[in-house]
Amino acid sequence: MGQSGSKCLCSDAASDGASGSSAQSFVASAKSELRKFPFTPSRSKTSGSHMGKAELSWRNSVMPASLDRRQALKAALLIQRWYRRYCARLEVRRRYTWTIFQSIEYQGEQDQIKLHNFFNALLRHVEHDAASGLVASMSPRHSPTQSDALSRMSVPLDAAIEDIQVESSYKGVRLLFPLTVDSIHSLVSAFKKKRTLHVRYVCLLLREAVLELQKRPVINQVSTSISGQVTICGDLHGKLDDLLTILYKNGLPSAENPYVFNGDFVDRGKKSLEVLLLLLALQLVWPNEVFLNRGNHEDLVMNARYGFCKEISKKFKGSHGPRVLALIEEVYRYLPLGSVIDNTAFVVHGGISQYTDLEKLALVDRSKYVSVLRVPLVDDVETSTLDLASVANPEIAGDGPTSRLADLAEEWKMILDLLWSDPQSSSGCEPNSFRGGGSYFGPDITSEFLDRNDLSFLVRSHECKSDGYELSHDGKCVTVFSASNYYGEGSNRGAYMKLQGRPLAPHYVQYTADTKNKHLTLRERVGRMELSAINELRCQIMASRPKLLKGFQEADPELTGFITTRKWVEVMEQASELKLPWRVLKDKLVAIDPKTGLVDYQSTFRTDKSSNSQDGPSVVEALYRHKSSLEAIFRLIDKDNSGYITMDEFRDACGLLERHASLPSEQIADLAASMDINKDGKIDFNEFLECFRIVESSFQQPDDDDSEEDDD
């Protein structure tokens, strides 16, 4: 892996050397060095001890073709040294850019979990009778009780589809069930032309997928006895081009070509619905050859923040959006949690922990976990004391209901670990504080798990890798990531893994789906990725401006505006909560005084546009800081995912705060009316943000009315 990666790096950098200014400068320098090397004529072997004048003149004219070997070697080493420095500088830029994107991504996941825990805490503070209604008001995101699950199973899934009619003007694909290979070709053709499938066919496809998934076990059992091989694909995250690239390079599924898709089909990418529908259609056509695992983004709580709910609302207006999401939620509930291939490999989205037990997992009722981030409500068991923090180290014991609660906590933790965990180089197992959920598991945990279950290696996804895959834990743990250009143009390759032969041996296929940027040099790709990462980082810095400024001023008690690099790095690490190489990044983010070498810390907040100086946080900074959380809150209140909040939904949400803040019904009605700016009886997201902006602005107005009146 390392050799192929270095070859690619060198070839790309070599192609870039002809055009880049850095490459030109090093070639010019190398030529100047070559001119310094003396060329001494060799002795004549025939007549006399010295050459004749004619022969010497002829030898001097062709001397560059017969350089002294030692001098030529020095020249080659010089060029090699310059070339390696050039590649090393590019690699440093690529690595810190990668770290920026990854840190921001994980911080966002952590914020989403904190936000969801906040809403759960609110629910726990409301009286039990009211809470049940409020939990229902959060549908379809709440976790059902066992009786709820049974009642939902008894309701025909096509009840929500009966009144959806296909208009005569519809020119798209018309699906007939059961699906065939021709149906797959029609879907691929339509999706490539950016055509949206009619909502009726979307619902029918989702319904058939739910019925198929209900037949599946918790852990898929995949056999290669006929095929002799299997293909494993990692995260796709709504990148349809990557999925189509895989199918083009590796072929459609068949008895000789089975697939395992390892979760995270949706979110972040613009074609999440198309990716999900195509994967479900593939499973319906080849039920014994296509296996789908659940990922941590197969969860509406995550979808509310990372774009899938928003995508559905855009593509299906009115009541159709909530219907589609309700069926998608049913798909999530019944997705298997992992796959075992020939008793050789365990394929799971996130990873494992010391608590992972395949025998216990096989008995889990996975349909209870509508959202893996929230413990399911079980009949006759009080679960209000459970949350992500308490389940990280479950030590609940006892008899009766308490014992059932302990079993539930253990079960929930196992599922969380499967979908959210990451490997670590050190031994042992500990909570995954970086993401906010799951565990970090070391090589000893991997070896013990594989030995206990008589397996050879663990295959997981969940983490973007620059080469599309990565080996860890002495090759026993493999990470496969199939979404190329995940963080931006040229940021990473996608890859899929093929297990072939007897015994099964891994092979990896890498690709980049973005053909527009296929011929960019390494320097151009790194430059574009770096620019995008720095812009993202500036947004995070602006969001933390008050906290950062306070830290800078504490480090500069005389308020000179300048501090040392060491103090600047310390403040950035503590206030931003991002683990980044700030010392390396300082030249990209701040101005340095050329005489003293001190950092102008006010330049940390510079933007392309001039901003008004003020002591407190600006409205723009507040929106930077809270926009993702505000959107998640908006979608939590929007119980039917219609894209707007009705007055009833707003009143239900205000009921969560009723215990801590007395809000009369008249005041709630007035508040809702004031947020409804265009007076259409509902609150859309723009109105929601505008009200937040107005409130932030009112708190930041200078309280100097009295002084102005005194001047008058």
Image: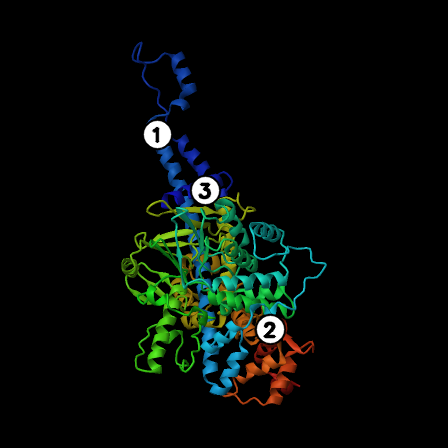
Quadrant occupied by the C terminus: bottom right
Give 510 or 356, whichever is nearer the viewer: 356
Residue under circle 3?
Answer: 13
* Residue that protrudes farthest toward the right in the picture: 169
Residue under circle 2?
Answer: 689
- Horizontally, is 481 left or right of 406 in the view? right
Q: Position of residue 420 (x, y in %)?
A: 40, 65
Q: Amino acid at mark 3?
A: Ala
The image quadrant that residue 96 belongs to is bottom left
Q: Amino acid at mark 1?
A: Gln
- State the separation of the CA atoms marked 2 and 3: 46 Å
Mark closer to the observer (1, 3): 3
Q: Amino acid at mark 2?
A: Leu
Asked if one can make out residue 582 in the rendered structure from this viewpoint, the answer is: yes
Q: Position of residue 460 (x, y in %)?
A: 39, 57
- Horizontally, is 67 left or right of 517 in the view? left
